[in-house]
Amino acid sequence: MDTTFPDLRRYGGADAFLRACKPRAILDMLTGKWSTLVMGALLDGPRRFNELRRILDGITQKMLSQTLRALERDGLVRRTVYPTIPPRVDYELTELGRSAGGLLAAIAEWSAEHADEVFAARRAYDERAAEPVQPI
Amino acid sequence: MDTTFPDLRRYGGADAFLRACKPRAILDMLTGKWSTLVMGALLDGPRRFNELRRILDGITQKMLSQTLRALERDGLVRRTVYPTIPPRVDYELTELGRSAGGLLAAIAEWSAEHADEVFAARRAYDERAAEPVQPI
DNA sequence: CGGAATCCTTCAGGATACTG
DNA sequence: CAGTATCCTGAAGGATTCCG
């Protein structure tokens, strides 16, 4: 056994650290620019395409459909088409999607809760960096 | 009040959906390409720069230092310099960093646990897409 | 050892227009 | 309404070199 490699059993068996490994690929997908937000918007129940577009401030229609397709492909989101006129398409989390979505929501919640703390740290850091070397 | 806007109180007060809002900025940072992995690698305790580089398969020195600086700036990571020769620099999670790191680790764990499920869904989706319209 | 600086490439993602 | 199809740009990120 390679004893030079640190023991990292706590992080999903450390597989997530190895690129080109499955867990890492999934982690990359989940932490993609929009996936977290899209899944968050679906936590309360099914949503239609343009409804999601309104909720997700700043997302383009291209990125929304791209993200939704990726999530559907991975079994996290189910897409239901009602062949009415005009057409209606619902997106909702699958069981698998809900289990991941809960975790992602926790991150979003953390972000909201600790926003001020983080921004304070940021200001402090920037002020320190602005100071010159330390005059005598 | 704008009643056309859906009720989304479950997602950090929904602030995370608004771009240019603090929680959203933090969420973007946390879900950045490397932040999750870097914080994960620090969960077990302090690590040195090149140690992290070895753990984080595929990261370049530039991205590692960039990510670490961003995390330090946001008060999630503490950087300690020991003025020895050769120099030694330790990175470790702050209290704030540990609280976020735990949540990120949960995501990584989820990725490892459900990797097979997700990849199976992916294969199924790709096969369905490959089929032509449906011959009689 | 632990970086900073530079150059260079690629591709994520935005804008726009069109369609069933 | 719910998307596709292009085109195009900026910035993320890789490779390389140099430094205290």
Image (spheres, coloured by chain):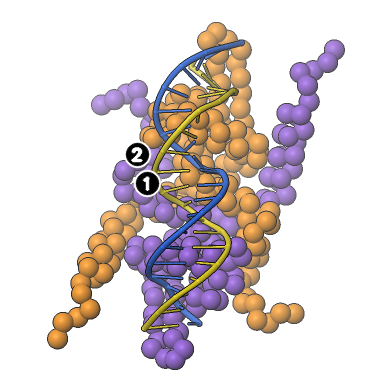
Chain colours: A orange, B purple, C blue, D yellow
Marks 2 and 1 sit apart, C-alpha to C-alpha, by: 7 Å
Residues B15 and C16: in front is C16
Quadrant of the frame with the C terminus of chain A: bottom left
Q: Does residue B45 sit above or below A77 in this rendering? A: below
Secondary structure, mark 2, is loop
Q: Pick out the residue farthest to the bottom.
A: B85
Tag 2–tag 1 contact (CB < 8 Å): yes
Residue B18 numbered tag? 2
Q: Quadrant of the N terminus of chain A?
A: bottom right
> Which disc is residue B50 wearing?
none
Q: Is residue B103 left or right of residue A114?
A: right
The answer to whether residue B81 is seen in the rendering is yes
Q: Amino acid at mark 2?
A: Leu
Q: Are marks 2 and 1 on the same chain?
A: yes
Viewer-proximal residue, A85 or A131? A131
Classify residue A125 as left or right of residue B103: left
Judge whether residue B96 can be spotted in this image.
no
| Residue drawn 59% across the image and 72% down it | B54
Identify the residue at horizontal 50%, vertical 78% (top origin): B48
Query: Residue at label 1?
Result: B24
Determine crowd level at label 2: few under 14, some 14-19, many 20+ residues with C-alpha closer than 10 A. some
Between A98 and B82, the residue placed more toward the observer is B82
Q: Position of residue A102 (x, y in %)?
A: 52, 46
Percent coordinates x, y for residue A78 in the rendering:
62, 31
Instruction: Identify the mark nearer the N-term, 2 or 1.
Output: 2
Residue kind at label 1, given as amino acid type: Arg
The residue under the point 34% across, 62% down is B74
Q: At x 44% / y 55%, what residue is drawn?
A: B30
Q: Is residue A45 left or right of residue A20?
A: left
Q: Position of residue A108 (x, y in %)?
A: 42, 48
